[in-house]
Image: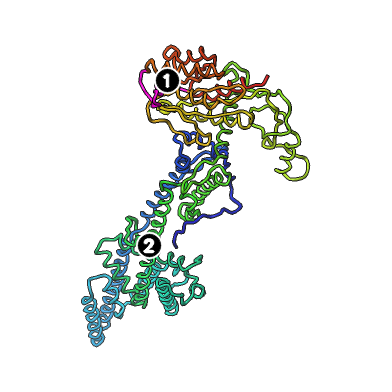
Amino acid sequence: MAVRYRFRRFGEGDDFDDVDADELLGRLVDDLLEDGDLEAALDRLLREGFETGDGEHVEGLTELLDRSRRRRRELEAQADPSGELERYREWLEHVESLEATGLEGLLEQAEASGDERRREVTRDLVDQRRMQRDLMSERFTERLGEYREYEFVSAEAREEYERLMAELERDVLDTYFRQSKEFLGRPDPAELARLREMMDALSTMIEQDRRGEALDPTFEEFMGRFGDYFPGAESLQDVVAMMAERAAAAEAMFNSLSADQQAELRSLMDQLLGDLDLSFSLTRLTANLREATPQIDWNRAHRLRGDGGSFADSTDAIEQLGQLRQLEDFLGRADPAQGLPEVDVEAIRRHLGDDAARHVERLQRALRSLRESGFVDRNGRRLKLSAKGVRQIGRLALRALFARLRDTPDLTGHASATLARGGDREETSTPWEPGAPVTLHLGHTLYNALVRQGPGTPVRLHPDDFEVEEYEALRRSATVFAIDLSLSMAMRGNLVPAKKMVLALTQLIASRFPRDYVAVVGFGERAVELRVEDIPSLTIDYNYGTNLQHALALSRHLLRHERGERQVVVVTDGEPTAHLTATGEPFFAWPPVRETLDKTMAEVLRCTRAGITINTFALDIERSQFPFVEQIARVNGGRLFYTDVDDLGAYVLDDFVTHRRAV
């Protein structure tokens, strides 16, 4: 009857695997890092769909929305109540034709009999019937009712009229009470009386509920008597929704007709329901349903352009059209990540088929997997990336960088990226990451395998079980990643790779070198320290300026109390164009003025005297055009890399790991 939207926990027996949360998060990474909005990235993924690891396409909400619109067009082309009204009109004309033929035949038989008395009586009868028909209304609905008092001469015409009325009565009842198809053939008085009692009892309950009174009959008593009309209903609200959707669909069926056709059909319906003694009860119930369901558009209309079909079929189609529009409201809403759990998969299955329902289930599973994995949290009504999710993005980025190094061993002249093996072995272990040296901590690895598979032999190892022994590094490092957040970084597509690199390297340091210090500084017009958790949502500085001077000063401040090797890793796509004045205000100029370059170089000298190495990764910079970064390398002694954005992460990773190796 009605579409109800609710969250459904999926049962067993589905013919597909759950979507892996790691895989789904990986598909979100680039979009998330592009504009920093997790929910917007998730909304786009849900709308567009995605390919699973095994190459299966999961349709997004946009494709499902297109399916729904195609289905609506199909329904609109299947029904037309105006055509049905015309069919009944032609059917009555056929009855009248049969009666006229019967009268003519009766008169011919009397004339041929030679019996003058018979001729006279027959002529009077035929004249009387013709006059009675001539005096009938020209309006179809009134004329149809007047034939109830007409005594047919033709047995064939009488039977055809009774067949017409029986079908019309069923059609009218089916229009308002879809369940009547299951237990009303030619409705008998007892069943019609029960139908009337149901409507009166339901009206009474709605009125009592509106006044805040106890229900009499109770809902349980009502369902005990009339539950076969409302399969699946669990509350009075369910019953009201079922009846209201059907009644509103019937109203929409009327509204799809012209004004004259509406008047004619309403007159026909009122006449038949009055004849069946249901008109008053239905009018009362409809009024109560309208008041109880303000959320339903009782004045809606649909364009039906089919080839006929019964009034009930048109109402069925319109009811489905209304439900499809409700589905489309959910499928097309601006925030699908919020609305998707509420979409009723069974409604999708009912209207769009099993295949569409499977796609919605996959999307719901995907969304739920992110929440259950702990990768996302809720901040008020919006979803945000959790600290665990940030770490996972770092791991995914790190795996990708290690894979790139393996695929391109000569990327920076090093055969491969390896980690330190020197030092004393710790009594601790850590999960193995792809690309890391494999010195298994056998006890922890076997324990993980047994927890995963349970007791018994053989013990089968999986890469996720691996834990490697940790060694105390003989060298401690302190690193500040200084990331250019000027407008050009976003315009040239450099910001997302830079954010990936930072997340990957901070994750590497946290997991492999926990004693190391790491911080992140973003700089545009000014420089500011950033939390690693804020990196995914980081956006560019829309104020003009590349204030490397402030970035180096802040980095030096952060490193002032750190011991061991200290370095600033600068990622930029342009030369310095801003500095802080004596009053602490930013100053910008393009092309850069001498004062900006001097103040920046002065900060380079301060870092050099403090023993801080500045390693610069220059994106999209020509050596001859911007020699300033080379001057930084000559003065400071740090390393300089000219690289494109695709190789940035691999360059930084390879350089960091190679020079982090303990001696």
Q: Count neighbours of disc 2 (C-alpha within 10 A) and say few if under 14, some if 14 to 19, many if 20 or more.
A: many
Report the front residue among 13 and 366. Answer: 366
Picture layout, residue 574 above or below residue 315:
above
Q: Quadrant of residue 237?
A: bottom left
Q: Disc 1 marks which residue? A: 576
Assign the C terminus to one quadrant of the image.
Answer: top right
Q: Secondary structure at mark 2?
A: helix
How dense is the environment of label 1, judged by Cα within 10 Å: few (below 14), some, or many (20 and up)? Answer: many
- Of residues 40 and 586, the one nearer the viewer is 586
Q: Residue at x 43, y 49 (%)?
A: 331
**Residue 375 inside the magenta-drawn segment:** no
Q: Which disc, if any, is residue 229?
A: none
Q: Position of residue 374 (x, y in %)?
A: 57, 44
**Given this view, does label 1 or label 2 mark the residue nearer the observer?**
1
Which secondary structure type mostly characterizes the magenta part of the structure? loop
Q: Position of residue 527 (x, y in %)?
A: 45, 28
Left or right of residue 380: residue 135: left
- Which residue range is magenta in the image? 572-591
Residue 391, percent across and down? 57, 36
Extreme-front residue of the structure: 583
Task: Return the residue nearer the eye: 260 or 439.
Answer: 439
Would you say 300 lies left or right of 420 here? left
Could you say which quadrant of the image residue 491 lies in?
A: top left
- Is 590 covered by the magenta stretch? yes
Is 568 above or below relative to 250? above
Q: Name the residue: 42% across, 67% down.
A: 243
Horizontal arrangement in the rendering, residue 406 relative to residue 246 (left or right):
right
Mark 1 vs mark 2, CA separation in Å = 71 Å
Q: Is residue 493 at all visible to an observer of this figure?
A: no
Q: Which residue is mark 2?
A: 315
